[in-house]
Image: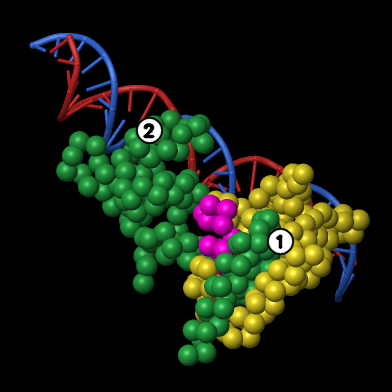
Chain colours: A yellow, B green, C red, D blue
Amino acid sequence: MSDHPRPTEAELEILGVLWQCGSATVREVHEQLGGLRGTGYTTTLKLMQLMAAKGLVLRDESGRSHIYRAVQAKTTAQRQIVGRLIDQIFAGSTSALVQQALEADSVDAAELREIRHLIDARCNRSKS
Amino acid sequence: MSDHPRPTEAELEILGVLWQCGSATVREVHEQLGGLRGTGYTTTLKLMQLMAAKGLVLRDESGRSHIYRAVQAKTTAQRQIVGRLIDQIFAGSTSALVQQALEADSVDAAELREIRHLIDARCNRSKS
DNA sequence: GAATAACTACGAATAAATTCGTTGATAGAC
DNA sequence: GTCTATCAACGAATTTATTCGTAGTTATTC
Protein backbone atom coordinates (compact mmCIF):
# COMPACT_ATOMS: atom_id res chain seq x y z
CA MET A 1 0.00 0.00 0.00
CA SER A 2 1.98 2.92 1.28
CA ASP A 3 5.36 3.08 -0.37
CA HIS A 4 6.27 5.93 1.93
CA PRO A 5 9.55 5.24 3.60
CA ARG A 6 9.53 5.75 7.33
CA PRO A 7 10.46 9.34 8.19
CA THR A 8 13.64 9.82 10.16
CA GLU A 9 13.86 11.95 13.26
CA ALA A 10 14.92 15.13 11.48
CA GLU A 11 12.28 14.54 8.85
CA LEU A 12 9.61 14.25 11.51
CA GLU A 13 10.50 17.68 12.83
CA ILE A 14 9.99 19.10 9.37
CA LEU A 15 6.76 17.20 8.87
CA GLY A 16 5.59 18.64 12.17
CA VAL A 17 5.88 22.14 10.78
CA LEU A 18 4.22 21.20 7.52
CA TRP A 19 1.32 19.57 9.33
CA GLN A 20 0.86 22.68 11.36
CA CYS A 21 1.14 25.14 8.47
CA GLY A 22 -0.48 23.10 5.74
CA SER A 23 2.18 24.17 3.31
CA ALA A 24 5.34 26.18 3.57
CA THR A 25 8.58 27.14 1.91
CA VAL A 26 11.94 25.90 3.08
CA ARG A 27 12.56 29.30 4.60
CA GLU A 28 9.34 29.17 6.60
CA VAL A 29 10.03 25.69 7.85
CA HIS A 30 13.52 26.66 8.80
CA GLU A 31 12.35 29.71 10.76
CA GLN A 32 9.64 27.70 12.52
CA LEU A 33 12.21 25.20 13.66
CA GLY A 34 14.17 28.18 14.80
CA GLY A 35 16.99 27.62 17.20
CA LEU A 36 15.35 24.34 18.12
CA ARG A 37 18.07 22.68 16.15
CA GLY A 38 21.18 24.72 15.57
CA THR A 39 21.48 23.82 11.94
CA GLY A 40 21.89 25.99 8.89
CA TYR A 41 19.41 26.84 6.19
CA THR A 42 20.95 24.58 3.59
CA THR A 43 20.60 21.63 5.91
CA THR A 44 16.86 22.13 6.07
CA LEU A 45 16.81 22.62 2.32
CA LYS A 46 18.71 19.44 1.68
CA LEU A 47 16.49 17.43 3.98
CA MET A 48 13.38 18.70 2.28
CA GLN A 49 14.81 17.94 -1.13
CA LEU A 50 15.52 14.41 0.00
CA MET A 51 12.05 14.13 1.44
CA ALA A 52 10.63 15.17 -1.92
CA ALA A 53 12.77 12.55 -3.62
CA LYS A 54 11.53 9.92 -1.17
CA GLY A 55 7.91 10.86 -1.68
CA LEU A 56 7.34 12.13 1.84
CA VAL A 57 6.44 15.61 0.61
CA LEU A 58 5.24 17.19 -2.60
CA ARG A 59 6.33 20.54 -3.84
CA ASP A 60 5.03 23.19 -6.13
CA GLU A 61 7.96 24.37 -8.20
CA SER A 62 6.11 26.96 -10.22
CA GLY A 63 7.33 29.93 -8.19
CA ARG A 64 10.90 30.80 -7.37
CA SER A 65 10.66 29.48 -3.86
CA HIS A 66 9.12 26.07 -3.90
CA ILE A 67 6.15 25.34 -1.70
CA TYR A 68 6.13 22.06 0.17
CA ARG A 69 3.38 20.04 1.76
CA ALA A 70 3.24 16.67 3.46
CA VAL A 71 1.94 13.77 1.42
CA GLN A 72 0.55 11.83 4.37
CA ALA A 73 -1.93 13.35 6.75
CA LYS A 74 -0.68 13.75 10.27
CA THR A 75 -3.02 11.12 11.67
CA THR A 76 -2.02 8.62 9.00
CA ALA A 77 1.64 9.00 9.78
CA GLN A 78 1.01 8.90 13.52
CA ARG A 79 -1.04 5.77 13.13
CA GLN A 80 1.70 4.11 11.17
CA ILE A 81 4.32 4.97 13.72
CA VAL A 82 2.21 3.84 16.64
CA GLY A 83 1.22 0.66 14.89
CA ARG A 84 4.83 -0.13 14.28
CA LEU A 85 5.66 0.55 17.90
CA ILE A 86 2.91 -1.74 19.12
CA ASP A 87 4.18 -4.57 16.98
CA GLN A 88 7.82 -3.92 17.63
CA ILE A 89 8.05 -3.41 21.34
CA PHE A 90 4.63 -4.30 22.73
CA ALA A 91 4.24 -7.60 20.91
CA GLY A 92 1.00 -6.44 19.34
CA SER A 93 -0.71 -5.55 22.59
CA THR A 94 -2.41 -2.18 22.41
CA SER A 95 -3.39 -2.35 26.06
CA ALA A 96 0.26 -2.76 27.05
CA LEU A 97 1.04 0.40 25.13
CA VAL A 98 -1.78 2.30 26.79
CA GLN A 99 -0.68 1.11 30.18
CA GLN A 100 2.85 2.39 29.73
CA ALA A 101 1.59 5.58 28.14
CA LEU A 102 -0.40 6.28 31.28
CA GLU A 103 2.70 5.74 33.39
CA ALA A 104 5.08 7.59 31.13
CA ASP A 105 3.52 11.01 31.05
CA SER A 106 1.68 12.68 33.82
CA VAL A 107 -1.91 12.56 32.65
CA ASP A 108 -4.34 14.95 34.30
CA ALA A 109 -7.95 14.24 35.10
CA ALA A 110 -9.31 16.02 32.06
CA GLU A 111 -7.16 13.98 29.76
CA LEU A 112 -8.15 10.78 31.53
CA ARG A 113 -11.78 11.62 30.88
CA GLU A 114 -11.01 12.22 27.26
CA ILE A 115 -9.31 8.89 26.96
CA ARG A 116 -12.23 7.21 28.62
CA HIS A 117 -14.56 8.73 26.09
CA LEU A 118 -12.42 7.35 23.31
CA ILE A 119 -12.70 3.89 24.79
CA ASP A 120 -16.43 4.20 25.34
CA ALA A 121 -16.98 5.34 21.80
CA ARG A 122 -14.93 2.44 20.57
CA CYS A 123 -16.81 -0.07 22.71
CA ASN A 124 -20.11 1.10 21.33
CA ARG A 125 -18.84 1.00 17.81
CA SER A 126 -17.65 -2.56 18.09
CA LYS A 127 -20.96 -3.65 19.60
CA SER A 128 -22.95 -2.40 16.64
CA MET B 1 18.77 10.14 36.04
CA SER B 2 19.08 7.38 33.48
CA ASP B 3 22.30 7.69 31.55
CA HIS B 4 21.15 4.87 29.32
CA PRO B 5 21.46 5.87 25.71
CA ARG B 6 18.38 5.22 23.66
CA PRO B 7 18.52 1.74 22.14
CA THR B 8 18.63 1.55 18.38
CA GLU B 9 16.36 -0.66 16.34
CA ALA B 10 18.72 -3.62 16.19
CA GLU B 11 19.44 -3.25 19.87
CA LEU B 12 15.74 -3.37 20.66
CA GLU B 13 15.43 -6.70 18.93
CA ILE B 14 18.17 -8.06 21.14
CA LEU B 15 16.68 -6.54 24.26
CA GLY B 16 13.41 -8.21 23.33
CA VAL B 17 15.08 -11.60 23.56
CA LEU B 18 16.83 -10.74 26.82
CA TRP B 19 13.59 -9.52 28.38
CA GLN B 20 11.94 -12.75 27.42
CA CYS B 21 14.74 -15.03 28.56
CA GLY B 22 15.97 -13.11 31.55
CA SER B 23 19.54 -13.77 30.56
CA ALA B 24 21.20 -15.41 27.62
CA THR B 25 24.43 -15.94 25.75
CA VAL B 26 25.11 -14.37 22.41
CA ARG B 27 24.50 -17.72 20.78
CA GLU B 28 21.09 -18.03 22.40
CA VAL B 29 20.08 -14.55 21.42
CA HIS B 30 21.24 -15.14 17.90
CA GLU B 31 19.26 -18.35 17.60
CA GLN B 32 16.15 -16.75 19.04
CA LEU B 33 16.32 -14.01 16.49
CA GLY B 34 16.70 -16.76 13.98
CA GLY B 35 16.17 -15.99 10.34
CA LEU B 36 14.19 -12.96 11.45
CA ARG B 37 17.16 -10.91 10.38
CA GLY B 38 19.52 -12.53 7.92
CA THR B 39 22.63 -11.49 9.73
CA GLY B 40 25.59 -13.53 10.90
CA TYR B 41 26.59 -14.52 14.39
CA THR B 42 29.40 -12.02 14.68
CA THR B 43 26.98 -9.21 13.95
CA THR B 44 24.90 -10.14 16.96
CA LEU B 45 28.06 -10.50 19.00
CA LYS B 46 29.34 -7.10 18.01
CA LEU B 47 26.03 -5.45 18.77
CA MET B 48 25.89 -7.02 22.20
CA GLN B 49 29.46 -5.98 22.91
CA LEU B 50 28.56 -2.42 21.98
CA MET B 51 25.46 -2.60 24.14
CA ALA B 52 27.61 -3.68 27.06
CA ALA B 53 29.95 -0.77 26.41
CA LYS B 54 26.99 1.61 26.32
CA GLY B 55 25.57 0.26 29.53
CA LEU B 56 22.42 -1.18 28.00
CA VAL B 57 23.30 -4.69 29.15
CA LEU B 58 25.47 -6.30 31.77
CA ARG B 59 27.39 -9.48 31.26
CA ASP B 60 28.85 -12.17 33.38
CA GLU B 61 32.28 -12.93 31.97
CA SER B 62 33.23 -15.66 34.40
CA GLY B 63 32.48 -18.53 32.03
CA ARG B 64 33.77 -19.01 28.54
CA SER B 65 30.57 -17.83 26.95
CA HIS B 66 29.45 -14.62 28.55
CA ILE B 67 25.96 -14.30 29.88
CA TYR B 68 24.07 -11.13 29.14
CA ARG B 69 21.09 -9.49 30.73
CA ALA B 70 19.28 -6.22 30.19
CA VAL B 71 20.00 -3.40 32.61
CA GLN B 72 16.62 -1.71 32.30
CA ALA B 73 13.41 -3.58 32.97
CA LYS B 74 11.19 -3.97 29.97
CA THR B 75 8.52 -1.67 31.33
CA THR B 76 11.04 1.03 32.12
CA ALA B 77 12.40 1.01 28.60
CA GLN B 78 8.93 0.87 27.10
CA ARG B 79 7.83 3.80 29.21
CA GLN B 80 10.79 5.83 28.08
CA ILE B 81 10.14 5.12 24.45
CA VAL B 82 6.44 5.86 24.69
CA GLY B 83 7.04 9.03 26.67
CA ARG B 84 9.41 10.22 24.04
CA LEU B 85 6.93 9.44 21.31
CA ILE B 86 4.18 11.35 23.07
CA ASP B 87 6.35 14.41 23.32
CA GLN B 88 7.84 14.11 19.90
CA ILE B 89 4.91 13.42 17.64
CA PHE B 90 1.82 13.88 19.80
CA ALA B 91 2.80 17.21 21.31
CA GLY B 92 2.48 15.81 24.81
CA SER B 93 -1.06 14.57 24.41
CA THR B 94 -1.47 11.06 25.75
CA SER B 95 -5.06 10.92 24.58
CA ALA B 96 -3.97 11.66 21.02
CA LEU B 97 -1.62 8.71 21.23
CA VAL B 98 -4.33 6.44 22.56
CA GLN B 99 -6.71 7.55 19.88
CA GLN B 100 -4.30 6.66 17.10
CA ALA B 101 -3.33 3.45 18.83
CA LEU B 102 -6.94 2.36 18.76
CA GLU B 103 -7.09 3.11 15.06
CA ALA B 104 -3.74 1.64 14.18
CA ASP B 105 -4.17 -1.91 15.35
CA SER B 106 -7.31 -3.94 15.27
CA VAL B 107 -8.26 -4.13 18.92
CA ASP B 108 -10.69 -6.85 19.91
CA ALA B 109 -13.42 -6.55 22.54
CA ALA B 110 -11.40 -8.27 25.25
CA GLU B 111 -8.53 -5.90 24.81
CA LEU B 112 -10.87 -2.93 24.85
CA ARG B 113 -12.20 -4.09 28.18
CA GLU B 114 -8.71 -4.40 29.49
CA ILE B 115 -7.87 -0.89 28.42
CA ARG B 116 -11.02 0.37 30.05
CA HIS B 117 -9.99 -1.23 33.29
CA LEU B 118 -6.65 0.51 33.11
CA ILE B 119 -8.41 3.83 32.73
CA ASP B 120 -10.84 3.11 35.52
CA ALA B 121 -8.06 2.12 37.86
CA ARG B 122 -6.22 5.28 36.99
CA CYS B 123 -9.29 7.44 37.52
CA ASN B 124 -9.77 6.01 40.96
CA ARG B 125 -6.15 6.42 41.84
CA SER B 126 -6.10 10.08 40.89
CA LYS B 127 -9.24 10.72 42.91
CA SER B 128 -7.71 9.41 46.11
C1' DG C 1 23.23 47.51 -15.29
C1' DA C 2 25.82 46.62 -11.05
C1' DA C 3 25.40 45.19 -6.47
C1' DT C 4 22.90 42.65 -3.19
C1' DA C 5 19.89 39.22 -1.40
C1' DA C 6 17.27 34.91 -1.61
C1' DC C 7 16.78 30.84 -3.67
C1' DT C 8 17.89 25.84 -5.61
C1' DA C 9 21.13 22.30 -6.57
C1' DC C 10 24.64 19.41 -5.42
C1' DG C 11 29.11 17.42 -3.93
C1' DA C 12 31.27 16.12 -0.13
C1' DA C 13 32.46 15.77 4.92
C1' DT C 14 30.99 13.81 9.12
C1' DA C 15 28.59 10.87 12.20
C1' DA C 16 26.00 6.89 13.59
C1' DA C 17 24.39 2.21 12.84
C1' DT C 18 25.06 -2.15 10.92
C1' DT C 19 27.58 -5.81 8.93
C1' DC C 20 31.10 -9.23 8.52
C1' DG C 21 35.85 -11.35 8.00
C1' DT C 22 39.79 -12.72 10.44
C1' DT C 23 42.45 -13.78 14.42
C1' DG C 24 43.57 -15.98 18.53
C1' DA C 25 42.09 -18.51 22.59
C1' DT C 26 39.72 -22.31 24.94
C1' DA C 27 37.15 -26.53 25.37
C1' DG C 28 35.87 -31.10 24.12
C1' DA C 29 36.26 -35.34 21.11
C1' DC C 30 39.06 -38.74 19.43
C1' DG D 1 48.47 -34.56 21.79
C1' DT D 2 45.85 -33.25 17.67
C1' DC D 3 41.71 -31.91 15.44
C1' DT D 4 37.47 -29.57 15.38
C1' DA D 5 33.99 -26.58 17.09
C1' DT D 6 32.84 -22.52 19.63
C1' DC D 7 33.83 -18.41 21.57
C1' DA D 8 35.34 -13.23 22.21
C1' DA D 9 37.74 -9.45 20.19
C1' DC D 10 38.47 -6.25 16.91
C1' DG D 11 39.43 -3.79 12.55
C1' DA D 12 37.30 -2.40 8.74
C1' DA D 13 33.72 -2.02 5.03
C1' DT D 14 29.12 -0.51 4.19
C1' DT D 15 25.00 1.92 4.71
C1' DT D 16 22.14 5.56 6.30
C1' DA D 17 21.45 10.06 8.27
C1' DT D 18 22.90 14.64 8.93
C1' DT D 19 25.49 18.63 8.05
C1' DC D 20 27.32 22.39 5.43
C1' DG D 21 30.10 24.93 1.83
C1' DT D 22 30.09 26.48 -2.76
C1' DA D 23 28.24 27.50 -7.16
C1' DG D 24 24.91 29.13 -10.18
C1' DT D 25 20.26 31.46 -11.01
C1' DT D 26 16.79 34.77 -10.47
C1' DA D 27 14.73 38.74 -8.43
C1' DT D 28 15.17 43.36 -6.31
C1' DT D 29 17.28 47.72 -5.20
C1' DC D 30 19.81 51.63 -6.16
Q: Nearer the viewer, residue A41 or D12?
A: D12
- Pinpoint residue B12: horizontal percent, then vertical percent: 46, 50
Tell which subunit mark 2 falls on.
B
Residue name at image x 57 percent, y 63 percent: A95
Secondary structure at numbered mark 2: helix
- What's the amino acid at mark 2? Thr
Residue A92 magenta: yes
Secondary structure at numbered mark 1: helix
- The quarter of the rendered structure image containing the N terminus of chain B is bottom left
Q: Nearer the viewer, residue D13 or B29?
A: B29
- As displayed, is residue A56 above or below residue A115? above
- Pinpoint residue B4: horizontal percent, then vertical percent: 38, 61
Residue name at image x 73 percent, y 48 percent: A4
Q: Main secondary structure of the magenta part?
A: helix
Q: Nearer the viewer, residue B85 or A127?
A: A127
In this picture, residue B28 sits left or right of residue B111: left
Q: Quadrant of residue B89?
A: bottom right
- Pinpoint residue A92: horizontal percent, then vertical percent: 57, 53
For the question of whether residue B101 can be seen, the reply is: no
Residue name at image x 87 percent, y 54 percent: A61
Q: Which residue is mark 1?
A: B103
- As displayed, is residue A120 above or below residue A52? below
Which mark is in front, 1 or 2? 1
Q: Few, some or many C-alpha atoms within 10 Å of disc 1 (few <14, some 14-19, many ≥20)?
A: some
Magenta extent: A89-98
For the question of whether residue B108 can be seen, the reply is: yes
In this picture, residue B111 sits left or right of residue D23: left
Q: Which residue is mark 2?
A: B42
